Amino acid sequence: MPSIYQLKPRFQNLLRPVVQRLFDNGTSANQVTLSAAVISLLVGAVVATFAGHAWVFLIIPLWMILRMALNAIDGMLAREFGQQSKLGAYLNELCDIVADSALILPFALLPEVSLLTVLLVTLLALFSEYAGVLGPMIGASRRYDGPMGKSDRAFALGVIATAVAFGLINAQWINGLFALMAALLLVTLVNRVRQGLKEAGTTAEQPAE
């Protein structure tokens, strides 16, 4: 299904000069990954602390843009400059779900916003990423199927946070949008399982060379 993730190659081409400069300065992929996670935790903590002031939610979309860039950069450093490692694989997946949780949960502190719905989105985001990671365990690739992958979540949360910051949305709308995100995350989880099984089955049916 369509996903913002499909735009990643174009985004990477724009970032390639920055990646080259970071590599020349001795920056590693793991350093970028950890930095993005730590900053996400700090952003989440700041937004949660000052959630009573709507304007603070404007930090989320601003950070989401930079975080998406950092996520692309760490992958490019790893693949294109020989920095891939087993530790990096762990950090890439674990830091993403930690960062996601830190940036989703502050929405539950808004007046009359459903804690249950926000928690549901948080958990389904985690489960859908876990379903993607399980692909290689059955002989498939790491699955990034949509419609609510990491990039799509970042976009959706950024839009909601912007609307909150400018007072364009009330609690009922936020609850409805989070419920929609939860439904799309459930579809994403199912898609990743189905596509992983399909890919693994196709691979298993191919004759060995």
Image (spheres, rainbow, N blue to C red):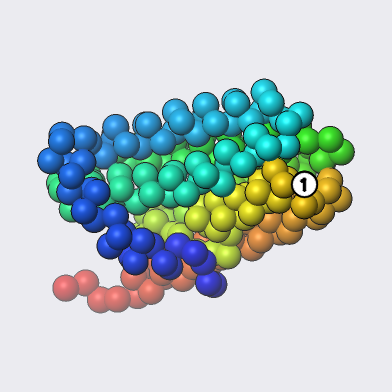
Q: Can you say whether 200 is above or below 207 in the image?
A: above
Q: In this view, does 27 lie to the left or right of 62?
A: left
Q: Is residue 190 left or right of residue 133?
A: right
The residue under label 1 is 167
Q: Where is residue 202 in the image (x, y as percent from the top left)?
A: 38, 74
Res. 57 image quadrant: top right
Q: Is residue 149 left or right of residue 136?
A: right
Q: Is residue 1 visible?
A: yes
Q: Considering depth in this image, is 22 or 180 the residue closer to the camera?
A: 22
Q: Residue at x 66, y 61 (%)?
A: 184
Q: Residue at x 68, y 37 (%)?
A: 55
Give the secondary structure at mark 1: loop
Q: Is residue 123 visible?
A: no
Q: Considering depth in this image, is 143 or 47 the residue closer to the camera?
A: 47
Q: Can you say whether 161 is above or below 183 in the image?
A: above
Locate the N terminus by quadrant: bottom right
